[in-house]
Amino acid sequence: PVALAGPKVSSDGQIEVLLSSMTLKEKAGQLSLFARPWGSDFNGESPRWNTTLKWIRAGQVGGLFNGERVKTNRELQRIAVEESRLGIPLIFGADIWHGMWTIFPVPLGEAASWEPELAYQTARAAAKEATASGLMWTFSPMVDTARDQRWGRNIEGAGEDPFLGEAFARARVEGFQGPDLKSPDSLAACLKHFAGYGGALSGLDYSESDMSESTFRDVFLPPFIAGIKAGALSIMSAFQALGGVPVTGNHWLLTEVLRDELGFQGFVVTDYEADGQLVNHGFAANGSDAAKISLSAGVDMSMQSGIFQEHLPQLVSDGLLSLDRLDEAVRRILRAKAAMGLFDNPYRSLDPTKSWPNATMIQEH
């Protein structure tokens, strides 16, 4: 048996003890998600790998995405739990939305079957293949309700009917995650893109969506509610502005609606650099301002922009950002990692003896 390093966390009390021992930089690190460099170059010749390994050893990264392979991710996890000060495990994610190695119909095609059970089965198969490839979190399902056929991302969802969207949201969340989040073949789900993204004006991606609150609640919100009730561990904030306010900086949406009204208990991750793009929206003056606005609005994890890692410690030190809000976000990430069993076994889904390709799995799928 492999000796498991890292902190043992199985209760909120133990999470609080761990949280109290973290520096501001380590807290900001848990809220920072970065793309894993290509390949597995650990020999010191790749600047991107050198930077990534430095961050992991310093506890300044909470997860990596879009890099499969059990051997590579297992070594990265070993570095995190054995060579960083606190030994907090990483989470490994990827975009997996119509199969990992076995390719299934796109979600819109599956939805045309009106058979959510089939979507459950394909999500379950994708979860088994992904977790056998060193991954444990998918940025899926996309549950945006379609409204304009010119919007290319309609292909990722279940179409224009909210009722059908609810059914497929439930099926895919349950299929990806399975009955036990701690199981080695459980792939944590991420509902996206919260919210109203499918209403992008003129079908232009990243464009604004503008609608009445009743339309928002009747058309766009129901599939997210269904996914939350199905137990989705995470939610991704959308790129666009909703009613003039960029979603990633929208406190009403990310806190008042998502947390206070819907009771979501998981964590919120931005879409790719969406927090930094608050500057492009004209909603933030610079990266530091964007980090403050997005965290204060209700974002818990920053994807790829690096602005949480770079700016949050100084913002808190200068009294410009609440330490309580920072701790709340870190607590949500630590709870998610505990729910996935990573503190019990940081090498879950990283077993080289059960990695893809797996003959039995190939036959089944």
Image (spheres, helix red, strand yellow):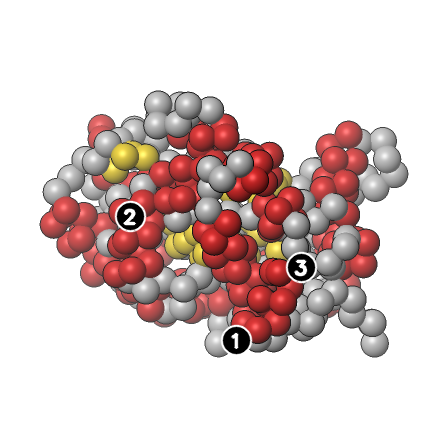
Q: How far apart in space, not on screen, are marks 2 and 3 (Cα)?
A: 32 Å
Q: Earlier in the sequence, mark 2 or mark 3?
A: 3
Q: Tell me if 34 is positioned left or right of 239 in this view.
A: right
Q: Amino acid at mark 2?
A: Leu
Q: Position of residue 84 (x, y in %)?
A: 77, 53
Disc 2 + disc 1, Cβ < 8 Å: no
Residue position for label 3: 21
- Give SS at disc 1: loop
* Residue designated by label 2: 253
Q: Tag 1: residue type?
A: Asp
Report crowding for label 1: few under 14, some 14 to 19, many 20 or more residues within 10 A (C-alpha): some
Identify the residue shown where x is 56% and y is 40%: 317
x 71%, y 67%: residue: 7
Find numbered disc 3 in the image and state the secondary structure of the residue it sits on.
loop
The reply to whether the C-beta atoms of the residues labelled 2 and 3 are less than 8 Å apart is no
Which of the two residues, 279 or 176, is positioned nearer the viewer here? Answer: 279
Residue neighbourhood size for the residue with mark 2, other residues' Cα within 10 Å, grouped as few (<14), some (14–19), many (≥20): many
Dot 3 crowding, Cα within 10 Å, few <14, some 14–19, many 20+: few
Q: Earlier in the sequence, mark 1 or mark 3?
A: 3
The amino acid pointed to by label 3 is Ser
Viewer-side residue, 123 vs 138:
138
**Tag shown at residue 180:** 1
Checking the image for residue 304, the label placed there is none
Establish if 248 lies above or below 221: above
**Where does the N terminus fall, quadrant-wise?**
bottom right
Q: Nearer the viewer, mark 1 or mark 3?
A: 3
Whole-percent x, y for residue 314 in the image: 57, 36
Residues 205 and 313: in front is 313
Residue 51: x and y in percent read 74, 35
Dot 2 or dot 1: first in sequence order is 1
Q: Is residue 283 visible?
A: yes
